[in-house]
């Protein structure tokens, strides 16, 4: 038994690289697929981390400018510098709708257009424009995050397939060699464990960051809802 143990160590004692080198073609294919999932998910994690941080910081800046300004035109002038904020998209949609409604309202008889108070025709239309813009912004900031959920749910099963395949190879080796010693079952078992570990290594970070980013997106979505109500209140006070 000690002889077989020494043989197994010699074959698989070179670390992870040695283990992968001794895996079969199916296990190598499973590992390659898991590596691709992991690389894509980490690229999304890094990209979305920067994007959501910028979106939150620029949203805070935009709110400060919006609340200090006396005119929508002043706020609109700084929107180009804060494109990373989803609030900018909501504001621009509301600002466009207000301008269109104000232009379409004729001044009362005997009053010039320059001296007449600008009025909006429909707050309901403005509300729909703000909601539509907010929905579009949420869709934009959620883009690619769903891939993390896919990675978290799919990769453990891909790893499990590799696990089952490795166990099947171990039993096949036992049947072919007529022995169940360590040297016979070690290749199949190591193949199974490597794919299991690779599946978990791809799934766990994706699940953690998917939940974390979802919470950040909910914060931004709440900020958009609050901003839309604030925008409506200002319009109702000044343009009706």
Image (tube, rainbow, N blue to C red):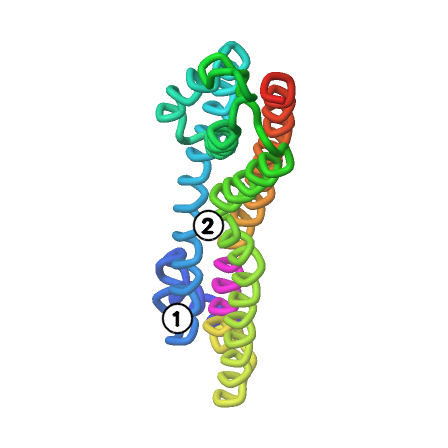
At 47% from the left and 16% from the top, the residue drawn is: 112
- 124 relative position to 59: left or right: right
Residue 158: image tag: none
Please name the residue that numbered disc 2 is placed on.
Answer: 144
Q: Nearer the viewer, mark 2 or mark 1?
A: 2
The quadrant of the rendering that contains the C terminus is: top right
Q: Position of residue 67 (x, y in %)?
A: 55, 13
At horizontal 53% and vertical 17% (from top left) the residue drawn is 110
Q: Work out whether mark 2 precedes mark 1 in sequence or the reverse, and give the earlier one.
A: 1
Characterize the local packing of mark 1: few (<14), some (14-19) or many (20 or more) Cα atoms within 10 angstroms. Answer: few
- Magenta region's main secondary structure? helix
**In the image, is residue 237 part of the stretch drawn in magenta?**
no
Tell me if residue 128 comes above or below residue 219 in the rendering.
below
State the residue position of label 1: 29
Write down the region rendered in magenta.
189-199
Nearer-the-camera pick, 12 or 209: 209
Give coordinates of residue 114: x percent, y percent: 45, 15
In the rendered image, is residue 32 in sight?
yes
Q: x and y percent of residue 44 in the render?
A: 43, 46
Separation of residues labelled 2 and 1 (CA atoms): 25 Å
SS label for mark 2: loop
Q: Position of residue 190 (x, y in %)?
A: 48, 67
Position above or below: 1 against 202: below
Left or right of residue 73: residue 199: right
Q: Is residue 193 magenta?
A: yes
* Badge 2: residue crowd in 10 Å (few <14, some 14–19, many ≥20): some
Going by the image, does 218 lie left or right of 93?
A: right
Secondary structure state at the residue bearing disc 1: helix
* Front-lying residue, 202 or 49: 49
């Amino acid at each position: 038994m000690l002889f077989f143990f020494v043989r197994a160590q010699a074959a698989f004692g070179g670390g992870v690289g040695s283990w992968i080198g001794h895996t079969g073609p199916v296990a190598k294919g499973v590992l390659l697929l898991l590596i691709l999932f992991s690389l894509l998910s980490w690229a999304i994690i890094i990209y979305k981390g920067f994007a959501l941080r910028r979106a939150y910081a620029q949203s805070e800046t935009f709110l400060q400018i919006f609340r200090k300004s006396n005119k929508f035109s002043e706020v609109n002038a700084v929107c180009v510098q804060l494109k990373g904020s989803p609030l900018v998209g909501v504001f621009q949609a509301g600002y466009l709708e207000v301008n269109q409604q104000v232009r379409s309202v004729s001044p009362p008889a005997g009053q010039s257009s320059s001296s007449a108070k600008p009025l909006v025709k429909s707050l309901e239309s403005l509300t729909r424009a703000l909601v539509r813009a907010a929905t579009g912004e949420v869709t934009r900031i959620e883009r690619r995050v769903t891939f993390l959920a896919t990675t978290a749910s799919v990769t453990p099963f891909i790893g499990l397939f590799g696990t089952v395949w490795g166990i099947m190879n171990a039993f096949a080796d036992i049947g072919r060699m007529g022995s169940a010693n360590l040297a016979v079952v070690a290749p199949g078992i190591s193949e199974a464990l490597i794919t299991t570990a690779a599946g978990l290594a791809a799934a766990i970070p994706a699940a953690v960051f998917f939940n974390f980013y979802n919470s950040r997106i909910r914060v931004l979505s709440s900020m958009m809802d609050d901003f839309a109500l604030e925008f409506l209140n200002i319009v109702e006070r000044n343009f009706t």
